[in-house]
Amino acid sequence: MDEIARALTEVVNSLPDRVTLVAVSKFHPAEALMEAYRAGQRVFGESRVQELLAKQALLPADIRWHFIGHVQTNKVKALVGRVSLIESVDSERLLNLIDAESERRGVVTRVLFEVHVAAEDTKTGFDPQEVLDYFAQHKYHSLKAVHICGIMGMASHTDDRERISADFRAIAAVFNQVKEMCPDLTGFDTLSMGMSDDYLLAVAAGATMVRVGSRIFGQRT
Ligand SMILES: *Cc1c(COP(=O)(O)O)cnc(C)c1O
């Protein structure tokens, strides 16, 4: 068995059944994704629109593509209709642009709200309070062609496992509060958090989706 298939199998076997694995393939060539595909992987995460579209053209049609990077507003048109989930919606403005473009194209776009709890202020995302306010005001009722499926987040970039776990619990708390506040929000069931070095901590904190890259594909160049 090749390296990628072996590493993938190890990650898959470490996950409970309820958790979806997103294989983060950014910066790796289509052949690397194909190795993971042959080993059974169907969900792939990319962070740049052009790179995603280029790989999509080369790879099997039953792959479910997740967009996990910052979405520039001028890339919304290229992305809508091409992906199974946009995990990284980080502003209402972006959300409304995706909604308008999806309606125009006659498709429904599934998204996650990216929430920012990490220590670094360089990372993008809604503040937890912004997310809670959005849902408390039931603003999602005005969406025409976007389905909000849950929350995505990242822990602080640190070796402090306690801090990482605390960040994951904070992200999970936002997810659970939204669910409680909005029982009419059907299909709000996805909590995407955890990467190569911390995905088991994320699973312990309630993640239903993890995004693992370098542990499967090796270091990015
Ligand atoms: C790159 C990336 C990942 C995967 O990171 P690894 O450490 O390689 O597992 C996960 N989530 C997001 C948002 C990323 O940009």
Image: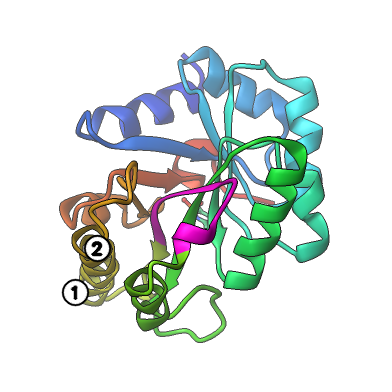
**Which structural element holds mark 1?**
helix
Q: Residue at x 54, y 13 (%)?
A: 38
Q: Residues within 10 Å of mark 2 (few under 14, many from 20)?
A: many
Q: In the image, 16: left or right of 32?
A: left
Could you say which quadrant of the image residue 56 lies in? Answer: top right
Most foreground residue, 203 or 217: 203
The magenta segment is 140-152
Q: Which residue is mark 2?
A: 172
Determine which quarter of the picture holds residue 21. Answer: top left
Q: Amino acid at mark 1?
A: Glu
Residue 162, disc: 1
Answer whether residue 77 is visible to the viewer in this image. Answer: yes
Residue 163 % position (x, y): 24, 77
Mark identifier at residue 70: none
Answer left or right for 196 relative to 75: left
SS at mark 2 in the image = helix
- Mark 1 surroundings within 10 Å by alpha-carbon count, few (fewer than 14), some (14 through 19), many (20 or more): few
Query: How far is mark 1 from mark 2, CA to CA?
Result: 15 Å
Q: Position of residue 177 (x, y in %)?
A: 22, 67
Residue 70 visible from this viewpoint = no
Would you say 179 lies left or right of 77 here? left
Q: Of the residues shown, which amino acid type is indicated by label 2?
A: Ala
Q: Residue at x 51, y 23 (%)?
A: 42
Residue 103, horizontal then vertical, whole percent: 69, 45
Mark 1 or mark 2: name the one nearer the start of the chain. Answer: 1
Residue 151 lies in the magenta-colored region:
yes
Judge whether residue 105 is colored magenta.
no
The correct choice, above or below, for 144 with respect to 122 in the image is: above
